[in-house]
Image (tube, rainbow, N blue to C red):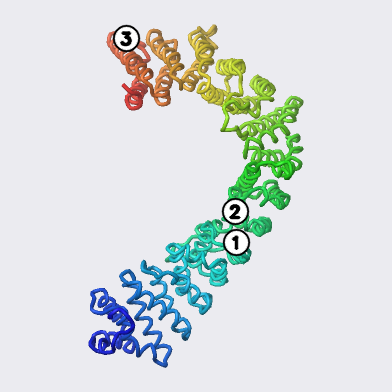
Amino acid sequence: GESSFGVTSTMAEESPLLLSLVEEFVSGQQDSKAKEAAKGVKDGQFTMLQLVEALGGSLTSSQPHTRSRGVQLLSEVLQENYADLTEREVEVLIAFYENRLKDHHVVTPPVLRGLQALTKCTALPPGSAVSMLRSVFQDVHVQSLMLTERGCVYNMLINLMETREAELKGLGADFVFGFVQSMDGERDPRNLLLAFQIANNIILGGYSLGKFTEELFEVTSCYFPIDFTPPPNDPHGITKEELILALRAVLTGTPSFAEFLLPLIIEKMDSDIQSAKLDSLQTLAACGSKYDHRDLAEFLQGLWTSLRREVFQTSSEKIESAALTALTALTSCLSRSVVNSDSEDTLITLLDLVLTDCKHHLCEPDLKLVWPSAKLLQAACSASNRASHIITAAVMPSLIEQYNSRTQCSHRRTLLEVVQRFIKSVKTNPSSDTDESVLSAYRAALCSMVFSALSESNSSLQITATTVLTSLIQQKGLLLDSDVGLAVDHLTRLLLTEEDESVSSAVVECAGALAELHPAAFITKLIPKLKEEMFSDPRENSEMNSHHAMCQRCLSALAAVSLHPSVVFESTPVLLQVLSSAHTDGARFSVDEVVLACRSLQRIAEQVQDTEETGRCFHDNIIPRLLSLALQAALQNEGSSGHGSPLTEEVFLSALVPVISTSCSRLQP
């Protein structure tokens, strides 16, 4: 029949067109004839196998270059027509090409291009994937090929792994060995991306590595850490980052590599090149999610020594942060392992190393190793609930004792900051709500530490204390109602008396965080107290300035604490009362305070939870009241001379508009 090799020679003679195309391409070197031949096959003028037949003379020529040119024509036509081939045609072509791989090396490039096209055929007969690869692995020395042909081999592997996985796995570890030999020594970045993709497919696809595990590691890890600068105006647009991530996926893809990779990482962390250090640390962090304690156990001491060095003697924030992330990943990995009575508890092993080298520095708040030590301990602490318990129990008592025995403000402030970072790094157990906080045992001591710092006169100590308090509030279920009440009393006192602007803004921020979780204490304590003070008469004229400043702090605080609808219903009437009181008694509140009261209303409209009640509160109460005040002031102003109401000032009207527009856009009518 037409589609077998049993084509009679008369058929080829009957197609003078085909013979002349072959002649012109092979001998006449007219490259355009390949396109014409491809179109002829597509249009059904002749078949692929008739083309093979017509090439007969060229393929048996004694000149390697003529044979190569003949195969090139076949491969170019095949690249345009591979999708339409029958299984029988594919079989014949594969046999033909495999045979040609044994030919002269100038014939190899077009043969590989033809085979690559055949790997895309849907009609691949069973067994052909394996036979093609065996031929390539046996007869071709891939690294002696040119760049494009090496790419052909990699693409053949990628195509076949996608469509013939089961068949390739049947090759066992021979497949891995063949690949290892093919990529060994690859230098081109484009081909490396392909090779890393194949290695990654081998690992993720669960191909058998057999006795070639170390070989696969060696042939890929020799590029680690990636040192590649793309050439200027590189048309392929391959970036160093792409190569780094592709290689990292391979190296961290299987715990089977752990025994080879971890010593390599320890060695490369010592590099003088920043990017190599960074890559090593990020690669180590990526291992955390794939490994278990058995993979890490024997390398913990070496890994810890390197990580400690990178944080203690850090040259850059990036490196320090990557080292801390890696320590968290390792701790997290060791925390996942179930402890058996017979296995060593590797989490304890690691944390002991960290505590031994870092804990004593926390008692030296005037020395520079406090911070790196605290950061390392906190990185470990934040990895898991279990790590939090172990580290907190080891460091918190001594930090509290240090704080209470120190007298110098700068030392106390450093200790407070260290404590605050520990509170933030504690990992609660997400699975249980009833679980006691890791910090429960230290609750009373921590609260008294914060409250005593808030009562100091040193502003930086007070500011740090507000951040510690905010962190304590955010620990679910830690503070008692009595602690919250005391905290609100301290914040209220500071709002009313503290003239330092940086302290008062820290207090306002802290009050906002506390009100979000504990609204009740603000309704009963803070709001009534602020209202009473704002409307009290300053005793002396000399106190006028500080009274106005206090009012402004109170107005800001009223906005900051108004997140819950329940608080908003108490705070907004006070703000409206400031406005109406300013209207009736022009001297009581300054224009600045009137504007600030509007800004506070606007801020509340921006942040309050949008519920039916809050919508009603603004649309039915606050906005009509504001408009009515503005209107009264305007009417009254027309009929009076002298100092009118501050509500006629343009700045008030400008501040009024956003309250209305925000309410309308954010709150349901």
Nearer to the camera, 15 or 127: 127
Q: Which residue is mark 1?
A: 224
User: Is residue 197 found left or right of 261 in the rendered image?
Assistant: left
Which of the marked residues, 2 or 3, is nearer the chain's N terminus? 2
Disc on res. 641: 3
Helix, strand or loop status at disc 1: loop
* Pointers 1 and 3 in contact (C-beta within 8 Å): no
Q: Nearer the viewer, residue 141 or 471?
A: 141
Query: Quick one: label 1, few (<14), some, or many (20+) residues within 10 Å?
Result: some
Residue 218 position within the rendered picture, expressed as x and y whole percent measured from the top left: 62, 65
Q: Is residue 64 visible?
A: yes
In terms of depth relative to the viewer, which is nearer, 657 or 47? 47
Separation of marks 2 and 3 at Cα, in angstroms = 77 Å
Q: Position of residue 190 (x, y in %)?
A: 47, 66
Q: Secondary structure at mark 3?
A: loop
Q: Quadrant of residue 507?
A: top right
Do residues under tags 1 and 2 come within 8 Å of each other at their CB atoms?
yes
Q: Classify residue 581 by image quadrant.
A: top left
Residue 438 picture location, percent across and down: 65, 29
Which mark, by number, is residue 283? 2
What is the three-letter code of the residue carrying label 3? Ser
Q: Residue furthest front?
A: 1
- Mark toward the viewer: 2 or 3: 2
Q: Earlier in the sequence, mark 1 or mark 3?
A: 1
* Vertical arrangement, residue 611 with respect to residue 534, above or below: below
Q: CA distance from mark 1 to mark 3?
A: 83 Å
Indicate the quadrant containing the N terminus: top left, top right, bottom left or bottom right: bottom left
Q: Quadrant of residue 649?
A: top left
Q: Nearer the viewer, mark 1 or mark 3?
A: 1
Label 1 to label 2: alpha-carbon separation: 10 Å
Depth order, front residue of 212/445: 212
Amino acid at the residue labelled 1: Phe
